[in-house]
Amino acid sequence: MNKITVSAPGKLMLFGEHAVVYGRPCIVTAVGQRMKVTVELSNDPFFELKAPDVSVEGYKKQMIDLSIGEIPKGAKFVEIAMYNFYNCYKSYTKNTGIRITTKSQFSSQFGFGSSSASTVCVIKALSELMGVKLTNMEIFKLAYKTVLDIQGVASGFDVAAATFGGTLYYVIGGKILKPLNLPSLPLIVGYSGIKADTVTLVNFVKEKAKKYPKVIDDIYTSIEDLVNLAKKALLKGDFQTVGELMNFNQGYLSSLGVSNDKLEAMIYAARNAGAYGAKLSGAGGGDCMIALAPTKSKKAVEQAINKASLPLRGKAGGQHIDIKTNVEGVRIEKYGK
Ligand code: MEV
């Protein structure tokens, strides 16, 4: 076999962002939009990458130069994933070049975790092509290392969702990785139209914690408490309680300073249109908000998110995105052509 296509899902954080970076649990779900990566062995000793969704076309370098020199932003995760794989599994790797193409079913602007999903795909594909046959836990560990090598700070929840799929109760580094056996959730997603930078937001909260260590630590402890209540409510299918806990979680995220007026406008619009609850999802500052709503209010909540407005600035609407939750993790799509 010299060619394989694998795919991995995007993710949405349901509860516990930011606090998860400091050892508290979170709950994340894998979404139906997937990243697809095709990896092909070639006879020339070059690494070639086509990733049109992140404006990388015709990127090419010698295999021996992997990880060396300036790497374009859109190529970083794929290249360092390859580099780490080759370093870890030297005895398996063949003396060939590698051609990689990535194709995403979701915009890299949404904050669905496209970088982590492509990292997981590359490691899975290489492990199959080279005959290493890694377990999902081994794929997760190497992909998480790759994300840390590049970002310096990350809990790895998005890597876990891309690898294992489903809805997970998760603690940093995979210390706890518990699948929650749930049906698909009636979740509505609104994209704010603003791209957030996770590392900037994590550092912003870190700076606040230097000034107010006890205040921030107490917030993390409260978030931990509500994540544990949310886990129970989700398992019982008690969406009313899940929604109320989303609202609590949003309050804490606002007090950490990572929400903004546009996200708040979309969140309040969703709540006023009949959602059980709504909150931002991920690092904050932009990306997406999520709402949980009864079936009868779904359309009204979607429209409210799209039309949300701010008193002094007028329209602040987002773009609702249809998603499925709780989907399958990394998988092989096809072998060969
Ligand atoms: C970002 O999507 C979520 C954060 O908790 C960072 C992380 O968990 O790596 C802010």
Image (cartoon, rainbow, N blue to C red):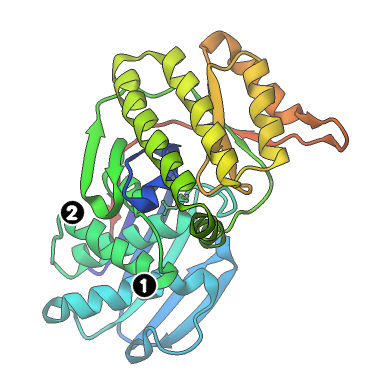
Q: Crowdedness of circle 2 by 10 Å Cα count: few (<14), some, many (20+)?
A: some
Closer to us: 28 or 135? 28
Q: How many marks?
A: 2
In percent of width and height, residue 253 lies at: 54, 40
* Image quadrant where one finds the C terminus: bottom left
Contact, mark 1 vs mark 2 (Cβ under 8 Å): no
Asked whether residue 326 is in view, the answer is no
Question: Distance between the Cα atoms at labels 1 and 2?
Answer: 18 Å
Q: Position of residue 180 (x, y in %)?
A: 26, 30
**Would residue 248 appear left or right of 136 to someone viewing this image?**
right
Where's residue 219, x and y in %? 45, 40
What is the three-letter code of the residue carrying label 1?
A: Asp
Residue for badge 2:
137
Q: Which three-letter amino acid code belongs to the residue tagged 2?
A: Met
On the image, the x and y values in percent for residue 259 come to 62, 42
| Circle 1 crowding by C-alpha within 10 Å: few under 14, some 14–19, many from 20 | some
Q: Which mark is residue 174?
A: none
**Residue at position x 29%, y 37% from top?**
169
Local secondary structure at mark 1 = helix
Nearest the viewer among 97 and 309 is 309
Q: Residue at 62% of width from left, 20% of height from top?
A: 271
Of the two numbered discs 1 and 2 in the rendering, the one whose residue sits closer to the viewer: 1
Q: Classify residue 110 as left or right of residue 222.
A: right
Q: Which residue is mark 1?
A: 149
For the point 42% across and 23% down, which residue is it? 185
Q: Could you tell me which quadrant the N terminus lies in?
A: bottom left
The picture quadrant where one finds residue 152 is: bottom left
Q: Is residue 48 above or below residue 50?
A: below
Q: Earlier in the sequence, mark 1 or mark 2?
A: 2
Is residue 111 among what the camera can see? yes
